[in-house]
Image: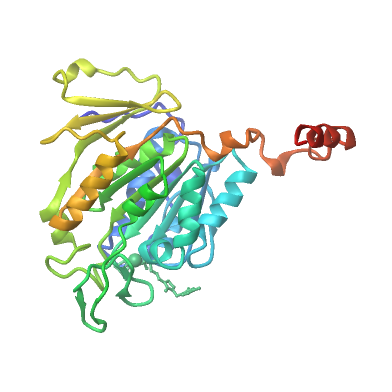
Amino acid sequence: MMEAKVESKYAKNDYRGLPSTLCQGCGHNSISSQIISACFELGIQPEKVVKFSGIGCSSKSPTYFLNRSFGFNGLHGRMAPLALGTLFADTSLKGIGVSGDGDTASIGMGGFKHLVRRNMPMVYIVENNGVYGLTKGQFSATAEKGLMLKKQGTNPYLPVDIAMEALVSNATFVARSFAGDPRQVKELIKAALSHNGIAVIDIISPCVTFNNQEGTLHSYTWGKDREAPLHEISFIPPRDEIMVEDFEEGSVREVTMHDGSLVLLKKLENDYDPTDRWQALRILEDAQRNNWLITGLLYINPEIPSLIDTYDLPQQPLNRMSQEQLRPGSSVLDEINAMMQ
Ligand SMILES: Cc1ncc(C[n+]2csc(CCOP(=O)(O)OP(=O)(O)O)c2C)c(N)n1
Ligand code: SF4
Ligand SMILES: [Mg+2]
């Protein structure tokens, strides 16, 4: 499948971060590498990105990419409100959030759902390993029922499915991927960066220290054996020549993004329509019942107005406006009040 890169004045090193202090082989490290590659291939100005996270091994990872970007490592489970406030105040920045399954699906669930339903444009990655890695391997809310871990015993609860939670909260871009499938992770991140709304990517990212037993969900072996991609995804930036004639007729589905870029989805075994929310929910239900790791772009709707469109926010960041712009005087206030009567 094609790889599309934009002519850029930046080198790959401009997108790197500090050396990782996570365990060797941790899925989170592989995702950081794909964030670096995605931003490099799109030629994004690093200073135009703001990174967010909460607390966890996953939430540490923004230190390991995009050193030149802004960043805010917040409290556990508070990434969503932090991102919402920041991006509301400065609409010129691209937001990339990295959270964990604990950070999002336990303590941060309320904030996550409200960020999603408000459709704030940002990339929201969940590095999902089924455990609280940083605090030494307790079951998280995404751990499967019956999972046995050495110091924890047996998990008695049914899991939360983050992609499903995003869908039922009316997310406009929902994907699932696997840290062991770096190309798919990268193309999904590129598409997510172009989406004019919330883009949730739930990535199974094995914790090699506390939850990587043969065959358990969230392990490398399970991902490798059970991954069932819905399609082969390629992201084509605006202005790139698209060689659709390279593909057999009917073998590729195209989704046009808000900025003119294209997401090409090459059909694999089944024809999957990622604009059909009902189909997305059904396939997730099937995946749960059959223990499949369905990956790819589950759902996209590029037409829904983002939070920025809803409030018609200015392109110029609020924190860089002058006193006169921020305090236009009582006559403007009178006009606004009159509009609201
Ligand atoms: C308010 C609060 N509660 C609990 C903790 C302890 N704590 C730190 S990280 C974490 C869970 C991390 O799990 P996850 O988000 O899945 O990240 P991972 O380490 O697995 O990548 C917990 C419970 C905390 N720091 N703050
Ligand atoms: S404890 Fe697990 S999640 Fe944390 S760095 Fe190590 S492998 Fe990754
Ligand atoms: Mg975790």
Residue 119, given in percent of the width and then of the height, sits at: 49, 43
* Residue 3 seen: yes
Residue at horizontal 61%, vertical 45%? 88
Residue 219, given in percent of the width and then of the height, sits at: 19, 63
Quarter-of-image position of residue 143: bottom left
Residue at horizontal 64%, vertical 45%? 89
Quadrant of the rendering where the N terminus is positioned: top left
85 or 321, which lies in front? 85
113 or 78, which lies in front? 113
Question: Residue lying farthest right?
Answer: 330
Residue at horizontal 19%, vertical 63%? 217
- Position of 77 with respect to 12 (left or right) is right
Residue at horizontal 15%, vertical 18%? 249
Q: Is residue 109 above or below residue 140?
A: above
Quarter-of-image position of residue 155: bottom left
- Position of 194 with respect to 164 (left or right) is right
239 or 247, which lies in front? 247
Residue 54, given in percent of the width and then of the height, sits at: 48, 63
